[in-house]
Amino acid sequence: MVLKIVLIIVFSFQTMIQLTRPILPLYASDLGSTTFEIGILTAIYAFFPLLFAISAGRIADRIGDRLPVLFGMIFASLGLLMPFFIHSVWCLFVSQIIVGLSHIFIIISLQNVLGNAASKENRDHYFGIFSMVVAISQFVGPLIGGYLAEYTSYSFTFFVSAMIGIVPIIIAFWIPAIVVQDKGKSSIKEGKTITLLKIPMLRKALIGSALVLYSRDIFVAYFPLYASSQFISESKIGWIIAIQGLAMVPVRFFLARLLAIIGRERLLLISILVAGVSFLIIPFTSSVGWLMFFAALMGAGLGCGQPLSMTTMYNASPTSKTGEVLGLRLATNRISQLTAPILFGIIGSGAGLLSVFIVSGLFLVGGAFITHTKEEKKVIKYN
């Protein structure tokens, strides 16, 4: 029952977000924003979550997960409703700040609920299903958003997104309000979140998670601009981004089997490499068919990173600090989501959109090898 509640809420919420995220740069561009300003707009979504993610995790540990999800969904819906009534760039900024803050309370608490409901043996499966549902929403959201933007308007797309929020707001009342007490002795002192980084598995999961999430955000932020410059319609842009999300579904469904065959470390390396190479190739074609193919490859590569990092961090965290650890993971993700759009906004303004894809792809490929090298050194050191 708990699993079903979490999956319905996360699917509805992620559909709301994914329905508007690919439309956001097009809406901002239509209102006169530059490439750099769009980079700032994309980054602002991550700024305040970066500051409050760990606190949101602590709140979930102390008061339970029901209220953070409920109030998060209410404010997210209100934030997405704003651009329907006010057509200005500053309104988009305010909207993204509200939605970004709401996002951390919702996602941390839902992951915490799921982790508490699962056993160590089936936690990979639970988080894999969770991530699979997120991936399905990443297919459904951009697809609906693309057609709505093309046949209605950008602002009406935000209105539809906000209305979807009614469903998870109602269902949030059925989330169990459980506060987990630590039954063992923890070496991590209260209030010292930075000391969590002493746990090697947490550090490794943080790096992999940040690599995966920043590349997804850069693609969603800048691919619509590239595709629009190639005279590709909004609905086709929506399809291409949706295909990327759809490709994550089978990878996450068979995640447990892939782990058994390939192994956790090698699977993470291969997945990031596939995503990075696809990122590099995408701007060298304007064919919708090839763009769908490489977007699918990129989605398949990125599909492994998030559930692997979630499970690794939850299993390695002290019992009474699972929410705080998930908050630390989200804060690290937000650092990459904050800095990457600004950095690539500057790069794109100076050297063109092509450079955004090349530099980001190289960074992703290089990050995969650096992470793998560090892991090998750890194995030698601790064995």
Image: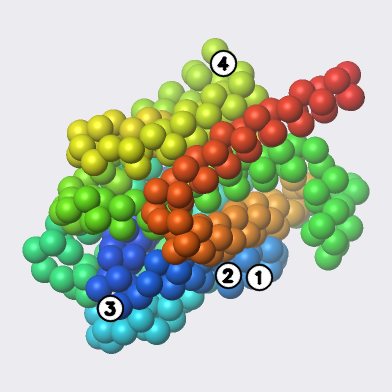
Residue at x-position 35% and y-position 61%: 21
Disc 3 to disc 4, C-alpha distance: 48 Å
Q: Earlier in the sequence, mark 3 or mark 2?
A: 3
Given this view, does label 3 or label 4 mark the residue nearer the observer?
3
Q: Which residue is mark 1?
A: 51
The residue nearer to you, when weighing 311 against 355, is 355
Q: Earlier in the sequence, mark 1 or mark 3?
A: 3
- Name the image quarter holding residue 32: bottom left
Q: Earlier in the sequence, mark 3 or mark 4?
A: 3
Q: Position of residue 86 (x, y in %)?
A: 28, 86
The residue nearer to you, when weighing 294 against 74, is 294
Residue at x-position 75% and y-position 53%: 320
Disc 3 to disc 2, C-alpha distance: 22 Å
- Name the image quarter holding residue 303: top left
Given this view, does label 4 or label 2 mark the residue nearer the observer?
2
Disc 1 to disc 2, C-alpha distance: 7 Å
Disc 1 to disc 3, C-alpha distance: 29 Å
Residue count near mark 3 (Cα–Cα under 10 Å), binned few <14, some 14–19, many ≥20: few
Could you tell whether 320 is left or right of 104 in the image?
A: right
Disc 1 to disc 4, C-alpha distance: 37 Å
Q: Is residue 105 visible?
A: no
Q: Which residue is mark 2?
A: 47
Amino acid type at circle 1 is: Leu
Q: Are marks 4 and 2 in contact (CB under 8 Å)?
A: no
Q: Earlier in the sequence, mark 4 or mark 2?
A: 2
Q: Which residue is mark 4?
A: 262
Q: Which residue is mark 3?
A: 31
Q: Could you tell me which secondary element the residue under label 2 belongs to?
A: helix
Could you tell whether 97 is left or right of 190 in the image?
A: left
Q: Are marks 1 and 2 in contact (CB under 8 Å)?
A: yes
Amino acid type at circle 2 is: Phe
